[in-house]
Structures are given as C-alpha cells and as structure tokens.
Image: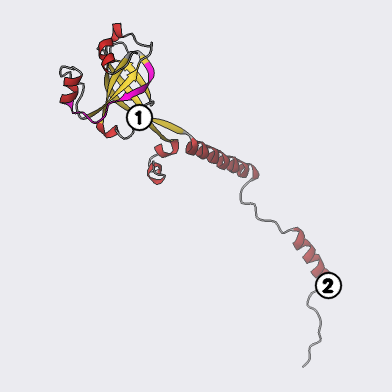
Amino acid sequence: MLVPQQRLFRDTAVKHYMQKRRVKDVLPRLLPVPIAIFLWILLGSFLVVGIFAWSTQVPIYVSAPGIVLDQQSALSFNSREPVAIVFLPAAQSTQVRVGLPVQLQVASTGQQVGSNIVQIEPGIASPDVVSQRYKLNSTGLIVGPSVVVLVGLGTALSTNIYAGSLLTAHVQVGSRRVLSLLPGVGSLIGG
C-alpha cells in the first residue's frame, strides 16, 4: 500500500523551532557572574605573585668569625687602611672573591658595619696555622679549615679602639630566587 508523501510537521512549526534554536544557543552558566569575576581576579593575582617570586632574588649569606687587626698587622698585609680578617669555612672557597659585600658586627658592642672583601689569602689554612700566623692564642675562634679574607673597614671602626675585637661577618656569597625557598619547589627549579 502506498503512503502519500506528506510531511509530519508543518513548515511554519519547523521554521519557528529553527529560529528559536538559533537565538538560544547559549552555554550553560555554571557559576554566577560575580564568582567568575572573582576567580579570574584570583588567577591573575596568582600569576603576578608567581612572576614576582620567579624574578626576585634574595641574597645568600655565610657567617664567619673574624677579628679587627691593629695598624701594624694591617701593614703586614700591605694595607694602609684599617682591616679585619675573617675566617670563612673552606667549603666556601669557590664562592669567595674580592669585592663581595660583607656585613660586620662587633661582638662586644653590637655595632654593624658594611664593607667589602679587599683581599683573599691564597689556599686553605688549618686552625693551627691560622692561630700561629695571626697570633690568636687558641681562642676557639677557628674550629676547622678556613679561607682567610681581609675586609676593609674604612673609617667606620677605629683600629685604636677596636683592634683585637672579635666580630661576626656575614658574607654575601650569592643569591637565589624567592620561589626556590618554598618547600618542594626549590628542588624542581634547581634552587
């Protein structure tokens, strides 16, 4: 039996459906607009902080004991200005060079002075050699092999007053990214 070729839907109904469909092609709204804006701002903030943490460097310091030299001892190092000798651990010998910044703190007064390394003695010295060469009389100042460096004092400390005073030196031996200080992240980025 033959079935007449007649459409199941009316033409006007199909047109009407197609027009509504074109207008209503909208993605579903999963989040309210204020929350979506907040999340975009939060993501942008994390990106800015991440870029800042990646690009900002913080200095790395090594602490070491030292002593202020009198004028006669300073002359033995061919130095006309007041100097202090600092005994850096031997492990730092590859990172130390002339001109590195140093923060000195006099043990007795707490006075702080900023300076630079002016000379590095060649080689690594044992505690006995250091005690004999610099006449430290076994003060317990040096406990291991050391690299001896001279730090210029300029006019900040008078050798007449401070000669023989013990001090603590903080030598800046490098820097690293702030991001590398976060636990777990430092090993990933080579810090």
For the record, the magenta segment spans 113-127
Residue position for label 1: 97
Pick whichever of labels 2 and 1 is earlier in the sequence: 2
Q: Position of residue 18 (x, y in %)?
A: 78, 66
Which quarter of the picture shows residue 79? Answer: top left
Question: Image point 28% across, 18% down: which residue?
Answer: 77
Which quarter of the picture shows residue 66? Answer: top left
Colouring rule applied to residues: secondary structure
Looking at the image, can residue 163 be seen?
no
Residue position for label 2: 11
Q: Residue furthest top?
A: 160
Is the residue marked by circle 2 packed among few (<14), some (14-19), or many (20+) residues within 10 Å? few
Q: Amino acid at mark 2?
A: Asp
Q: CA distance from mark 2 to mark 1?
A: 89 Å
Q: Tell me: residue 124, above or below residue 5.
A: above
Which of discs 2 and 1 lies nearer the camera? The answer is 1
Question: Image point 81% across, 84% down: which residue?
Answer: 5
Instruction: Judge from the rendering whether residue 54 lies leftward or rightward of residue 36; answer left or right.
Output: left
Q: Position of residue 74 (x, y in %)?
A: 28, 15
Which quarter of the picture shows residue 160? Answer: top left
140 drawn magenta: no
Q: Amino acid at mark 1?
A: Arg
115 drawn magenta: yes
